[in-house]
Image (cartoon, helix red, strand yellow):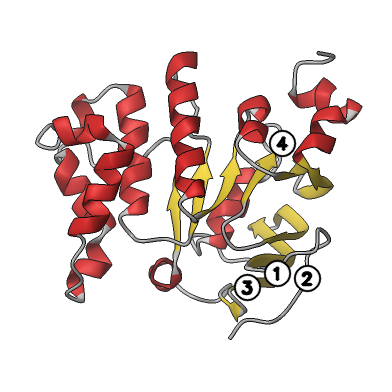
Amino acid sequence: MFRSLKLTWGVRVFFETVKVDTSFGDIPILRGISLEMSAGEAVAILGANGSGKTTLLKTISGLIRSRSGEIRFEGRRIDRLSPEKIVRLGISQCPEGRRLFPHMSVSENLQLGAYWRLRRGERVGKDLDDVYGFFPLLKDREKQMAGTLSGGEQQMLAMARALMAGPRLLLLDEPSLGLAPMVVREIFAIVQGINQRGVGVLLVEQNAVMALNVTTRGYVLELGTVVLADRRENLIKNERVRQAYLGGNP
């Protein structure tokens, strides 16, 4: 049973990192990262290249082990668990660069997303129908090899594969990377739809305008440190954020 904690914004804590440090060898990447989310919330992580955004998501999902601090999900400490166990608890990551299996079909990639659930005998037909509801193009291409899809379709497949794990918290790493503006708008509309279904979303994104359009709060990282955390509307008005990430004055 998770703790009855309170965020600064007056809601219950669903997920949190507490003073997390992560290093590559002797090189520190994350320095004392603390952030919080409530259940079903969508939160943006903003920052320039090299600020530690991707390392943060990999640390949360167990792909990189933190040196110190704590990561808690629904009150349970997860920072010493394996990536497989973290996925089973309800955290799924859609990685930067999609990382699909290009010589496998759309359907096979989706089945791999649900691998641990299928192994224990779960029925995932409804989840597959829901995924195809979000991404109808994938239904039309379910027998097509993933490597032959367009960039936008591959991003949709990567997100759909992450959803097949049945997450309550979805980690999204740069979903707009390399995509045309029209496709980016479609991707972010889907992100918003996923969140409206009750799935929490932690969104790492350099396109700060789009990220703040689909989230309620944000954290700004610089050199592995949280330098600003606030509601979306306050971040949009913040002069420092506007100059660095929103293209200057509107």
Of residue 186 and residue 224, the one placed in the foreground of this image is: 186
Of residue 150 and residue 1, the one placed in the foreground of this image is: 1
Q: Secondary structure at mark 4?
A: loop
Q: Which residue type does callout 1 highlight?
A: Arg
Residue 250 spot, x, y in % from top left: 81, 13
The earlier-in-sequence mark between 1 and 2 is 2
Of residue 30 and residue 245, the one placed in the foreground of this image is: 245
Q: Which dot marks residue 92?
A: none
Quickly name the residue at label 3: 72
Q: Are marks 1 and 2 in contact (CB under 8 Å)?
A: yes
Q: Which dot marks residue 47?
A: 4
Mark nearest the camera among 4 and 3 is 3
Up/down of 8 relative to 144, above or below: below
Q: Secondary structure at mark 1?
A: loop
- The CA distance from mark 3 to mark 2 is 14 Å
The residue that appears at 67% across and 26% down in the rendered structure is 209
Quickly name the residue at label 2: 6
